[in-house]
Image (tube, coloured by chain):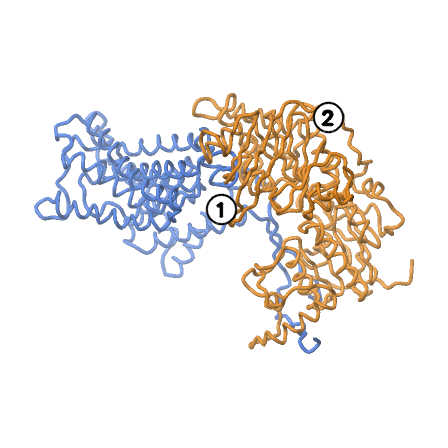
């Protein structure tokens, strides 16, 4: 046996200090905010170093970005227009993730929502001269139903056959895009172009600029009613998750499905319902985007809102109210990004913010201590 | 002191965690060739002290001497280099690999070629030397828990451990496996090894230990007392700081109407094999009926069937004379059935507090309303009345002495005893007709156990029918009015007044009727 024994190994050179991580027993309420803000600042600091190394002037670049996103009412309005679909999609993901349903199909549900809303106008289910008071709600309902259908499919497959929703929702994204493409190219094409005819004005969501006659300062502001959808939806999702019986079931299933079953909760039914509402919210985002911004069905209606929504939901730590400021921050990055560089710096900052925020989670869960390594180690 | 050299000496060990001084100038000494028990309630600092000794934690103050020389232990690797090895409660083994592979894992040799056959022989010899019988070629997943523990011990012996720290080694073992473990421990001591045995079970400590050190709230209350010079009662007092009642004050039982009746109940386990083969029993209101048996003989499945979590494959369950499950039972299945049972007053203290009984990241409030959120006054239409929910949580926290900073604290931060009190508070506050209590005191310390016992007896006096499943025979006999013994999914018989020996025979598969015929038990 002795011949097989291992020799004690000489360690390499060691730091004179070591870092200890100890799990936190309690999290004060302020800690989350401080750490989150600290992480965002750190991200911009790191970004500044990269900009400096690249020969740029970080402070000027940041100043320019802030002006480009928030500098005047016009760009602020544009930022909010970008944030609007992100709020809705972020809420869709927040709801599903609260039950640990990994709906990464918000992009597809967004496209189907746009399709459903368009179908009301283009089929046409309602004639163009219909009153907006009927047209807009009809488009909302159609958009949400189409999105909900796109959520129902993976929800049902998961509840009934335990099909992994990550795969099914991801795959359905491609189906949704191509479904839309079929209608854009073949059915509702305008003179062979890859887009539908423009919607009649009755199918447009009201924008601030529409009221420029009474309030001249609103001229040119494109913020549309979709923002209100987003804010109201945030309130509703918050109420559902934290004040309703259903939301309690969602959180219980999300945290411990076995305890939920022990409490008599129908997990399969909730899986289907949550996926449908999640899809419905993403569908509403699609409706709001084409009715409020694009005003026609076309291929390029989303620069990946559905996927950004996943990040928004995470950064908001699945808090529906926090989704609003996070979505605006992302809207600002999209908006400012377009102004200074088509790609590059804004994407980099987005990435660094994300990494810093995810890494900062460690500080919330652990206490970090630096201790001197004793001699003779 | 005697002339026996000390294997380990710990002097004035101090270790602080956020908010708690886990070890407050603790002295501990281990002689060569002894079994030294470290006794204490949950949270007394036993595990902390031993984690310091095994290199997992670093002490804030104090010194460790091994064989008389001061040492610095920075990692378990350092500790094992000094001959100290710890066997944790939760095994650290790779299920898909063989015993030999697991033992060699992380060592410098073999370097590249595995030459497993040679190592297998060495490990088999080592096992034979200490009575640790396990096939070196078996995969870990094929082994029972007891065998896996042997692999952990072999792992430490192979690494040259002279001092073995065993953290509550009997918690996972069946009674007959415990006897085997004790034999191994004695064999190892005879070979000159020294053993530290962490436990909070008094009778085991009395049975195996040479000397005993008791910790209470991070301080030593008894240091190296020979087991022959102390008693269970004295140790219990040293552990909890007051006299513990071993004999429960129990009013005579006054059974009322029949609440629960199982008729020829059958069910399958998770692997699809029969787990219950025709179980029939009755529980009346105002009595505690015990179900004794070695773990894995169908107790878990029985509790799950009665609470609707597992389908019955035959027979039926009647509650208050109405068929609820199986047989002629009409009505919903699965989650609907569970809801119906909850409504009709069946409460369930599940075996697994953390994975079934609670949602770890939700608050105390959210966990307390788990069974009552559908009904008034917690429910208000579609919404939950959060003021009412908080009120309920505060009231239960008060009356069941659940120690938490606030009712918004996530329950993952609660200790085992507090978590169990939370579950008991929830399940008892619904004033159940029928209570299925699975291992309600498992892993709790003496003080907490006493509290749980009193809560159960109070329910019995309030007229609840209680089916108590426990592996602690002593507890079962002192609490229950009647005891059924289950073996391999069958009831071996019902006893009222019986010796532990009779029940022991029944737990290993003898029918009571056979024992009576053979004269091994009174008729």
- x and y, in percent, of residue B29 in the image: 82, 57
Q: Which residue is found at the position 38% from the left and 50% from the top? A: A350
Q: Is residue A49 left or right of residue B6?
A: left
- Which chain does orange denote in the image? B
Viewer-proximal residue among A85 and B169:
B169
Secondary structure of the residue carrying numbered label 2: loop
Q: Quadrant of the C terminus of chain A?
A: bottom right
Tag 1 subunit: A
Disc 2 designates what residue? B253
Question: Can you say whether B141 is above or below B292 in the image?
Answer: below
- x and y, in percent, of residue A260 in the image: 50, 37
Q: Is residue B87 left or right of residue A160?
A: right
Q: Which residue is found at the position 69% from the left and 46% from the top? A: B510
Tag 2 subunit: B
Q: Is residue B461 left or right of residue B187?
A: left
Residue B65: image quadrant is bottom right
Viewer-proximal residue among A216 and B32:
B32
Residue A67 visible at all: no
């Amino acid at each position: 046996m002795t011949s097989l024994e291992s020799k004690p190994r000489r360690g390499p050179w060691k730091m004179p200090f070591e870092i200890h991580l100890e799990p936190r027993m309690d999290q004060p309420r302020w800690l989350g905010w401080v750490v989150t803000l600290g992480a965002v600042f750190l991200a911009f600091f790191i970004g500044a170093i990269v900009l400096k190394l690249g020969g740029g002037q970080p402070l000027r670049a940041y100043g320019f970005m802030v002006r480009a996103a928030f500098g005047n009412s016009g760009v602020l309005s544009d930022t909010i227009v970008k944030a609007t679909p992100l709020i809705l999609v972020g809420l869709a993901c927040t709801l599903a993730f609260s039950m640990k349903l990994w709906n990464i199909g918000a992009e597809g549900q967004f496209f189907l929502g746009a399709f459903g809303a368009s179908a009301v106008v283009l089929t046409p289910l309602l004639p163009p001269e219909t009153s907006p008071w009927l047209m807009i709600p009809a488009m909302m309902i159609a958009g949400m139903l189409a999105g909900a259908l796109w959520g129902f499919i993976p929800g049902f497959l998961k509840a009934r056959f335990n099909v992994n929703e990550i795969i099914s929702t991801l795959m359905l994204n491609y189906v949704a895009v191509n479904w839309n493409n079929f209608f854009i190219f073949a059915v509702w094409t305008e003179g062979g172009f890859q887009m539908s005819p423009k919607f009649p004005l009755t199918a447009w969501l009201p924008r601030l600029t529409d009221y420029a006659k009474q309030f001249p300062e609103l001229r040119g502001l494109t913020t549309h009613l979709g923002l209100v959808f987003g804010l109201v939806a945030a309130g509703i999702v918050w109420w559902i998750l934290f004040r309703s019986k259903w939301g309690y079931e969602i959180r219980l299933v999300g945290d411990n499905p076995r305890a939920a079953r022990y409490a008599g909760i129908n997990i399969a039914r909730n899986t289907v319902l949550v996926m449908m509402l999640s899809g419905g919210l993403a569908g509403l985002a699609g409706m709001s985007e084409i009715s409020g911004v694009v005003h026609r069905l076309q291929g390029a209606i989303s620069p990946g809102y559905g996927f950004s929504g996943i990040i928004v939901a995470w950064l908001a730590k699945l808090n529906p109210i926090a989704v609003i400021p996070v979505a605006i921050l992302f809207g600002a990055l999209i908006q400012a990004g377009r102004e200074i560089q088509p790609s590059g710096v804004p994407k980099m900052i987005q990435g660094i913010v994300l990494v810093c925020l995810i890494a900062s989670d460690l500080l919330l869960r652990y206490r970090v201590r630096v201790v001197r390594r004793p001699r003779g180690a | 002191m005697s002339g026996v050299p000390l294997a380990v000496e710990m002097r004035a060990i101090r270790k602080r965690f956020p908010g708690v001084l886990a070890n407050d100038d603790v002295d501990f000494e281990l002689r060569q060739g002894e079994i030294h028990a470290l006794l204490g309630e949950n949270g007394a600092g036993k595990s902390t002290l031993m984690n310091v000794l095994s290199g997992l934690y670093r002490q804030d103050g104090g010194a460790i001497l091994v064989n008389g020389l001061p040492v610095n232990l920075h990692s378990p690797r350092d500790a094992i280099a000094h001959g100290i090895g710890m066997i944790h409660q939760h095994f650290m083994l790779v299920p898909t690999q063989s015993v030999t592979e697991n033992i060699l894992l992380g060592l410098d040799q073999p370097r590249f070629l595995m030459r497993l056959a040679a190592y297998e022989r060495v490990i088999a010899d080592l096992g034979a030397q200490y009575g640790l019988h396990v096939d070196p070629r078996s995969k870990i997943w094929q082994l029972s828990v007891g065998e896996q523990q042997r692999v952990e011990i072999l792992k430490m012996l192979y690494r040259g451990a002279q001092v073995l720290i065993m953290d509550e080694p009997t918690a996972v073992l069946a009674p007959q496996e415990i006897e085997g473990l004790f034999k191994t421990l004695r064999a190892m001591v005879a070979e000159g090894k020294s053993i530290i045995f962490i436990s909070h079970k008094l009778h085991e400590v009395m049975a195996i230990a040479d000397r005993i050190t008791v910790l209470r709230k991070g301080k030593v209350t008894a240091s190296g007392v020979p087991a022959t010079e102390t008693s269970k009662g004295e140790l219990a007092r040293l552990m909890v700081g007051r006299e513990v009642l071993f004999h429960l004050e129990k009013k005579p039982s006054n059974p009322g109407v029949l609440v629960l009746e199982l008729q020829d109940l059958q069910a399958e386990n998770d692997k699809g094999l029969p787990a219950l083969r025709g179980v029939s029993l009755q529980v009346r209101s105002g009595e505690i009926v015990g179900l004794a048996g070695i773990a894995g003989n169908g107790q878990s499945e029985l509790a799950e069937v009665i609470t609707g979590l597992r389908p019955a494959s035959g027979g039926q369950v009647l509650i208050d004379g109405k068929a609820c499950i199986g047989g002629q039972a009409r009505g919903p299945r699965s989650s609907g059935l569970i809801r119906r049972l909850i409504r009709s007053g069946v409460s369930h203290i599940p075996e697994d507090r953390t994975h079934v009984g609670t949602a770890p990241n939700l608050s105390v409030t959210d966990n307390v309303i788990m069974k009552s959120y559908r009904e008034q006054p917690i429910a208000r239409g579609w919404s939950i009345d959060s003021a009412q929910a908080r009120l309920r949580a505060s009231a239960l926290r008060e009356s069941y002495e659940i120690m938490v900073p606030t009712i918004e604290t996530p329950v993952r931060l609660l200790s085992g005893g507090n978590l169990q009190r939370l579950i008991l508070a929830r399940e008892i506050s619904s004033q159940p007709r029928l209570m299925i209590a699975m291992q309600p005191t498992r892993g709790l310390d003496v003080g907490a156990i006493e509290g749980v016992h009193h809560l159960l007896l109070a329910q019995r006096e309030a007229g609840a029918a209680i089916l108590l499943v426990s592996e602690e025979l002593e507890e079962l006999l002192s609490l229950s009015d009647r005891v059924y013994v289950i073996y391999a999914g069958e009831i071996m018989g019902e006893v009222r007044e019986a010796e532990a020996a009779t029940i022991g025979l029944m737990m290993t598969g003898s029918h009571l009727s056979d024992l009576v015929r053979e004269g091994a038990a009174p008729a």
